[in-house]
Structure formats: C-alpha cells, structure tokens
Image: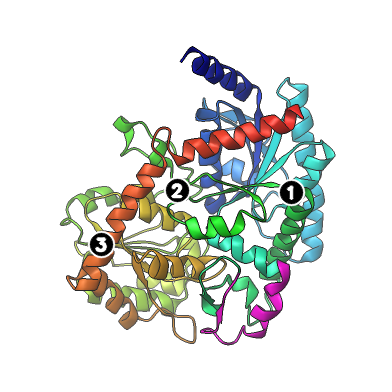
Amino acid sequence: MAHEKDEEHNNGRQGRRSHFLVVVYGIQGHLNPARTLARRLAHIGGCTVTLAVPISGHRRMFPSDENTEEANDGAISYIPFSDGKDDGSWPKDSDDRMQRREANFKSLSAVVKSLADSGRPVTCMACTLSMPVVGEVAREHRLPLAVYWIQPATSLATYYHYFHGHDKLIVQHATDPTYEVTLPGLHPLRICDMPTFFTQKTHNELSEMILQALHELFEQMDQEKLMVLVNTFDALEDVALKAIQPYMDVFAVGPAVPSLDAPQQHKNTTEAQIIHLFKQDDKNYIEWLNAQPENSVVYLSFGSLITYTKQQVEEILHGLQACGQPYLWSVRKEGRSEEADFCLGEVNGSKGMVVEWCDQLQVLSHRSVGCFVTHCGWNSTLEAIVSGVPMVAVPSWSDQPMNAYLIEQQWCVGIRAERDAEGVLRRKELVGCVELLMGDSEKSVQIRANVNNLKEIAQEAVATDGPLERSVHSFVKRVQDLGNS
C-alpha cells in the first residue's frame, strides 16, 4: 500500500512538471471539447495546461481583456495567437489559407518561446483536427504532438482508410447514396453516411481546403506516429476504436461534456464550464421550460454554423406548430435572412419559443425536454446522449451524416429525417419524425429505453477510476516517457 502511495505521489509530481499547449480553432464546436480536454489534463493528469486560442475567439471569450493578454481561470491558462487576419473569417482561397498558415506558424512559435522564457516550457503540443501547422511548430521546437480528434472514432477510421487506398472506390460511387462500402474493421457504410467532403457534388473551395488539410494531417500521423486523442469512449464505439488501433496510438478521452466533470453539488450549473461565443437570449427560456409538462418539449437547434433560408424557416416553423407539442427553437439571427427573421417575429408564446442562443446542456438536461431535433454535430450528439434525450437527426455536412448513421443504426437512440432534393427539411417529414419519437409505439418505447441505457453507460465512462481517467493517465504517462527517452 505504501509503495502504491509513493508511486501515485511520484506520478503526480511528474504530471505537474508536464506542460501541455492545446491549440484550437476559435469556433464554438472546437473550443468547448478542447477546454474540457485541457481541464481534464489539469485535474486528472495533474499537468499544467495552456489553451491557445485565435485572437478572434479570445476577444469574444475575454471581452474586457486586451487582445494579447493571457488569462487564467484557476485551472488552465488561455493565450491568444494570430492568423494574420484576426477577424474570425474562413480563408477565401488557397493563397489566403497559406498566408494565414504562415502567420499561425510565426505566432504559435512565439507563444512556445514566450512560455519557455517565462519559466513554463511546453513539454507537449496538442491540436484539434485540420491544423497541420501545429505539427510544423512542434517539429521546430522538438516537441511531441497529439492530435485531438473531436469527431467520432468511426469518422477517424473512415478518413484513415479513405486516405489509404479506398478513395477511388468511394469517389467512383459518389452519386449512388445507397451504395455500401466495407472498410477494414468497420460495419458497412452507405455513401450517404460518409463525410460529405468525400462526395461533394459541386465545387466548394472551403470543403476542398478542409479535405486537403486533413490529408496533410493523416500524412503527418503516418510519418511521425502521432498520438491521437478521440472524443469518444470504449462502450460507445468499441468497433471503430478496435478498427483504428492497429494503425495509430489512440486514446479515448471522451465524452467531452463539461457537466459530467462538475462537482455533484453543481451538476445543474454549466454556465461557468461552457464557452459561449454568442450572447444568450434575454428571454427566460428556463422559466418557460419549467412551465411545460415533463418530456413534452421539442428542442430544435442546428448549431452555430448552419444558415437558414426563408423556405427552410417556414417549413420548420409550420412543422413544429403542426406537431402540437411545445417547442424551443434556438436559431441565431446571423444564421437567417431578413425574410426568415420576419417569419419568426410573432412566435413566442405558450406553445413555442424562439431564442437566438441558449445553454444547450441546461436545456437538454431539463425534465420537460422530450426530443432533440439536431444537425448531428458531434458535440450536440454527445450532449444528447449524456442527457438521455432521443434525437431526430437532420445532418447537413462534414461528419454529420455519419453521426446520424450512428444515432439511428448503431445505437438506435433516434431516427433520421430526410431532406428533399433541394436540401430542405419539409414540415411533413419533421412532423412524422417528432410524432414517432414522442409517441407510444413499440419503436419509440425501445428508443427511449436505449437512450436511458446509453446515458448510464456514458456516466460510467467518466466515473472515478473509470475508463476516461485511466485513458488520460495513460496518455500523460506516454508523453512523460517520450520526454525521458
């Protein structure tokens, strides 16, 4: 017993000497899982952690601070870096991308040097996906690098095989959505379940740039045998994790849902743990939710990036109203046209509420919410799982079709709603899906049972001395061993 305590004490001292610089895109979907990882490295791994955020994101996170000022929340530090534009925009073309990449390299390299000069030398770098420039900085400073894959392990395995000889087969059948491809170790996947970047039907420079950046990242993974952290857990994606393990050093460190890490007495308070880049609506949506019957509310949100046409707003609005259930719809004003905005002007009332932004975890964990109509972003998917809410899956781009496949086919915790040939979710389709999930049919009862079971499994994954803690400790030890070799 004494030996075990000494070993724990030594591991703790080694952990405190480790300093992770976690580099992240400055968008909502990357920031929160990255900060959750950073806090877990600090709390579970006993490490020093700095989260490097683009200046545009840092400004929104800390509006009262100077743009170049480092911040600290008592657990981790936050430091800004520049892409040369610092306005939060996406690259316009390949030339713009290269210019920003050069600016990123110089700025991040300066951050590493500055931390060393201040007596806090970085011992390992980590980055969210699609950031190959971080690898260049890590090589420059001779630091180990870990990639934080903030999509499912199934997506990681699919991208790996796409870049390792299966791209021609997938592209060849890109116009046949029901064609099945069997990749090594995975269940068969239809073309329509694949990441959209593989089967883009029209020229889209942004998608092409993202796919190129991912290609570079996987080449770097191969050449340098990088460690890969995945925002998932064994019991959720055991098949995909086993399928990818022969090809890379993988650590399952999810689910990255902040409320799971809160002390028990603060389980219902997620505000301090979640980064909100958008101002929450002044309407008291929690008070409105409190007034609704248990499991009665349809919550709809398509995330922070998707935009709505007037036609799509009208279809969703009429669909929600036709369901006859109370509904809460989160849709940012920047994400809808003026014509669409006009349609929503008089919605709020006893049966429905439209807000620009809300604390999604707080909403999903509310007793009145009965189903979640979602775009299937991976963060939203995990949040619904840990909250025990069935999903209507309405995927749009990137990994979302694959997440919808997992929701409907692998875990059976929701159903997929199909868009029409114009990419519009029609009211009839929405109504049919919501009525099925909120009804009492044998299928809906089974889905709700599956949801509750998966919620319990997710809680077990993050329990003290559970799979998550063991995986974080294993990763930190691997980094320390690299530093001692």
What colour scheme governs how the chains and residues are painted in the rendered image of this protein? rainbow
Left or right of 367, for residue 59? right
From the image, tell me which residue sits under label 3. 448
From the image, tell me which residue sits under label 2. 279
Say whether marks 2 and 3 touch (CB < 8 Å).
Answer: no
Name the amino acid, label 3. Answer: Arg
Q: Is residue 315 visible?
A: yes
Residue 7 screen position, x and y as percent: 56, 19
Is residue 226 placed above or below 269 in the rendered structure?
A: below
From the image, tell me which residue sits under label 1. 225
Name the residue located 24 percent from the left edge and 69 percent from the top edge.
Answer: 444
Q: Is residue 66 visible?
A: no
Q: Tag 3: Cα neighbours inside 10 Å, few (<14), some, or many (≥20)?
A: many
Question: Which element type, helix, strand or loop, lies under badge 1?
Answer: loop
Toward which corner of the image does residue 333 lie, by quadrant?
bottom left
Q: Nearer the viewer, residue 310 or 24?
A: 24
Q: Tag 2: Cα neighbours inside 10 Å, few (<14), some, or many (≥20)?
A: few
Residue 167, magenta (yes or no): yes
Residue 323 screen position, x and y as percent: 23, 74
Toward which corner of the image does residue 273 lie, by quadrant?
top left
Name the amino acid, label 1. Answer: Lys
